[in-house]
Amino acid sequence: MRPSVARIPVHPLSQYRRACPRFTEPKEIVSFSYVGNRTVEMNDRELKYYHPPSLSPPPCLFDKFEKQIKRDPTINEHIDGLLSALGHLNDKRQLPHSDFVMYRGMLTKMFITPYSLRDSWTMNAMRVGSTIYVEDNVTDDVIAQRNGSSEKHEKLMYSGYRFETLSTIDKPPSQLLPNDPALEQRADGIVDTHKEYCSVFKITLGINSVILGAEVDCIDREKPAEFPNRYYRELKTCGLLDSQRKVETFERFKLLKFWAQSFIAGIPTVTVGFRGDDGILQSIQDFKTLDMPRVVRNKSRMWDANVCMNFADRLLSAIKRHAAKEGPETQYRITYDSTSQEVSITPMENMPSFLTPEYYSNISN
């Protein structure tokens, strides 16, 4: 007998054009760092502080491309880092209950699906007790695509990391001295994608509570002890908006993703570095997360934040309802198919667990 499949259609979007569901302000419960060898440390060692670069002269975001230290794209890390942080909380009896655990990128995909209809995706889900763990389904095709990127695409990806390097320092700006060497050192810095700072926080969307892990680019000031996420800042890059068509594309697609990522994490500001085709950083602009939906409101072919939130809320509720059997023997494949434009939830038997043995043993006892 074939496993039963639940299907959630994206259309019509009118069904999601209603008041947005309840959404609680994200509050950080723990943070951690990936250090140079990709080891998790339960500290803020890789937390950076925002300090914009000088545009006189404007730097090139392709500089030192050949010297970068890149993470191996063939290694599937699953959600191991997030589980390490949650295991740390569980050991201290500080792990709060939630309906879901996942990285922010998974919820972002759910948010933007109504307006990213051409972008298929798949995820894996596994229930343990009353909590459902969700991860990206990294297939061989995905890995092959990562390895087969053109040099032009690789440079554009690199430019984002380079912009982060040029826009951050290792200590709070209030501690900078006149002509501080820290500002010169970052220009000479080599991009190392092994290093990362992650915030773990909890939100509620509708009736669904979610613990999320998210890479965070930087913070605006010294981190307080009791920490809402509103002091964090996102850093992005984009090509110059030198035509009306490019402006519309930016607002329709990039601004949507910027909003979803930052809104989910409670991050108030997205700083965008605009570069030319030659990689030269031409300008820097701040976008307020809560203003982004108003920027596109009443414009043709644009997005509606309420639709995104209501769709994600419905999808989470459907996953919670249909992913009823506990793993690891049974997992669930959650798939958005761009052809049918619907999300399916399919039981998958005898799948290898994507939870680490240490974590699974810890929470099962």
Image (cartoon, helix red, strand yellow):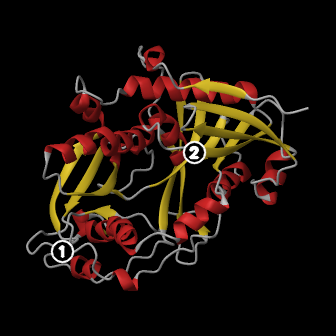
Q: Amino acid at mark 2?
A: Trp
Q: Residue at x 48, y 65 (%)?
A: 196
Q: Nearer the viewer, residue 27 or 12?
A: 12
Instruction: Quickly name the residue at label 2.
Output: 121
Nearer-the-camera pick, 35 or 289: 289
Q: Is residue 300 above or below residue 126?
A: above
Closest to the observer: 30 or 7?
A: 7
Q: CA distance from mark 2 to mark 1?
A: 36 Å
Please name the amino acid that badge 1 sits on.
Answer: Pro
Residue corresponding to mark 1:
59
**Residues packed near mark 2 inside 10 Å, few (<14), some (14 to 19) or many (20 plus):** some
Rendering quarter of residue 4: top right
Instruction: Indicate the position of residue 16 as horizontal and vertical percent values.
Output: 46, 18
Residue, x 25% and y 33% (percent of image)?
291
Q: Residue at x 43, y 45 (%)?
A: 227
- Sequence order check: which comes first, mark 2 or mark 1? 1
Compared with 142, 98 (above or below) is above
Q: Evaluate whether residue 213 shows in this view.
A: yes
The part of the image, by quadrant, that contains residue 50 is: bottom left
Q: Secondary structure at mark 1?
A: loop
Q: Number of numbered discs present?
A: 2
Q: Residues within 10 Å of mark 1 (few under 14, many from 20)?
A: some
SS for callout 2: strand
Q: Position of residue 77 (x, y in %)?
A: 64, 63
Where residue 136 appears, x then y in whole percent? 62, 50
Give the residue at the far front of this rendering.
Answer: 339
